[in-house]
Image (spheres, rainbow, N blue to C red):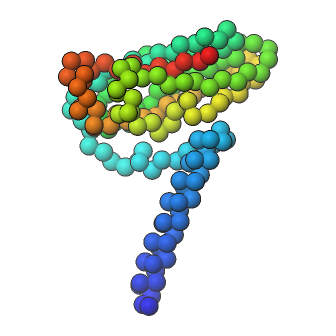
Amino acid sequence: MSPKAKFFTRLFAFLALSFIALQAYNRFCLFGNKCQPIYFSKYLSRTEGNQELELDFKVQNYRADLDFYTLKSDLITVANRLNTITFVAKNTTNKPIKFRPKLVVDPEEFADHIERLSCLCSQTYHLEPKEQIKLTMEFFIKPSIAKVRNLANDNNITISYEVE
């Protein structure tokens, strides 16, 4: 085998193994609550859509021991644009607490068209007494959202997190 063919064979093998290892790492992060997954799709260029979408962000907090809110309550975006929303969680007690937010998208048919790169719902959070943390949700709206029948009449989507 020529040196050039050896090089490309080794390069291909390295990239294939790296891709497999990255998938395993991402699964470990999602289920182990120890790290943040790595998504290369976040860095790829995408053609943005034309139709503006209005996103509202809400929090349904049913816990007395936790202040949980978003820093931005609304956003106007288009398909394929990277969006980042920051939430704040604060333990209001003198005891450690755990919580796991649950994502709710309304109307429900839009949920499949949101590509989440980081989601607060993917892990359980531990807060020490009086500790405050910022949590970030990163996502794209998929272009396939234009095919949803309700989008022609209403381009408003509500993304909320429930904490029980």
Residue 69 position by quadrant: top right
Tell me residue 35's x, y (percent): 63, 42
Q: Is residue 68 left or right of residue 52?
A: right
Total residue callouts: 0
Note whether 38 is above or below 131 in the view shown: below
Kindly tell me whether residue 42 is visible in this rendering: yes
Most distant residue in the bottom direction: 1
Most distant residue in the right direction: 94
Q: What residue sits 61% from the left and 44% below the top?
A: 29
Tell me residue 67's x, y (percent): 62, 13
Q: What residue sits 42% from the left and 34% below the top?
A: 139
Q: Is residue 13 left or right of residue 151?
A: right
Residue 164 position by quadrant: top right
Kindly tell me whether residue 75 is visible in this rendering: no
Most distant residue in the top direction: 64
Of residues 28 and 12, which is closer to you in this image?
A: 28
Q: Is residue 28 left or right of residue 153?
A: right
Residue 122 position by quadrant: top right
Tell me residue 111's x, y (percent): 39, 29
Q: What residue sits 28% from the left and 32% below the top?
A: 145
Tell me residue 146's x, y (percent): 24, 32
Q: What residue sits 62% from the left and 47% below the top?
A: 28
The image quadrant where one finds the N terminus is bottom left
Q: Is residue 163 left or right of residue 51?
A: right
Of residues 3 and 33, which is closer to you in this image?
A: 33
Note whether 34 is above or below 106 in the view shown: below
